[in-house]
Amino acid sequence: GGVMGFLSQVFENVYDAWAYIDPSGAMSVSRASLFQSLHQLGISPPPSFLSALLQDTSLSSPSSSQSDMIQVESFLRVASWHPLPAGGAELDALLDASWEKRQHTADVAMRASQARRSQGAQL
């Protein structure tokens, strides 16, 4: 259930979800744009989801003054509903593959969220 349950219904994997959320390919997004992307899908993430993201972000880069920015690695760790590779080249390749099909992913995601809304589903 929750955010991961919904993302897993809409996206093939968490990398596709990230490609949808990070349209510029910057590997980080502001809290505001993360929430905007999730709201477009009809998801209102619970505070626990955001606090887990922010906690992971501050643990992985404690010196970062970018506390408003959610890093790709933090999103993958917190939001994933499947095992993740250790990182490095394998992770880059998975993110690249998702990036290349982003437009298709976005179309599918918007259709799925419209279907959910028409059923009156809420998260």
Image (cartoon, grey):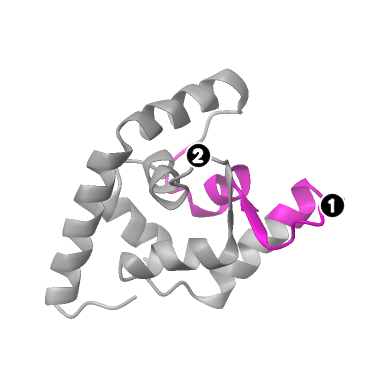
In the image, residue 84 above or below residue 20: above
Residue 2 appears in the rendering: no
> Could you tell which of marks 1 and 2 lies nearer the N-terminus?
2
Pick the front one: 100 or 57: 100
Q: Quadrant of residue 113?
A: bottom left
Instruction: Give the crowd class for mark 2: few <14, some 14-19, many >=20 residues within 10 Å.
Output: some
Magenta highlight range: 57-83
Toward which corner of the image does residue 87 lie, by quadrant?
A: top right
Contact flag, marks 1 and 2 (Cβ < 8 Å): no
Which residue appears at 50% of the width and 61% of the height?
34
* Residue 74 part of the magenta-drawn span: yes
Q: Nearer the viewer, residue 106 or 46?
A: 106
- Disc 2 on helix, strand or loop? loop
Q: Which residue is mark 2?
A: 25
Residue at 57% across / 19% down in the picture?
A: 89
Q: Amino acid at mark 1?
A: Pro
Quarter of image, res 44: bottom left
Residue linked to disc 1: 62
Q: Count the numbered circles shown.
A: 2
Query: What type is the residue that disc 2 sits on?
Result: Gly
**Quadrant housing the C terminus:** bottom left
Horizontal and vertical percent position of residue 60: 76, 47
Q: Residue at x 45, y 46 (%)?
A: 18
Label 1: few (<14), some or many (≥20) within 10 Å? few
List the single residue furthest toward the top.
Answer: 89
Residue at position x 56%, y 76% in the image: 47
Is residue 4 shown to the viewer in this render?
yes
Whether 116 is drawn above or below 57: the answer is: below
Residue 120 falls left or right of residue 7 = left
Question: Picture coordinates of residue 21 (x, y %)?
Answer: 44, 52
**Residue furthest out toward the right:** 63
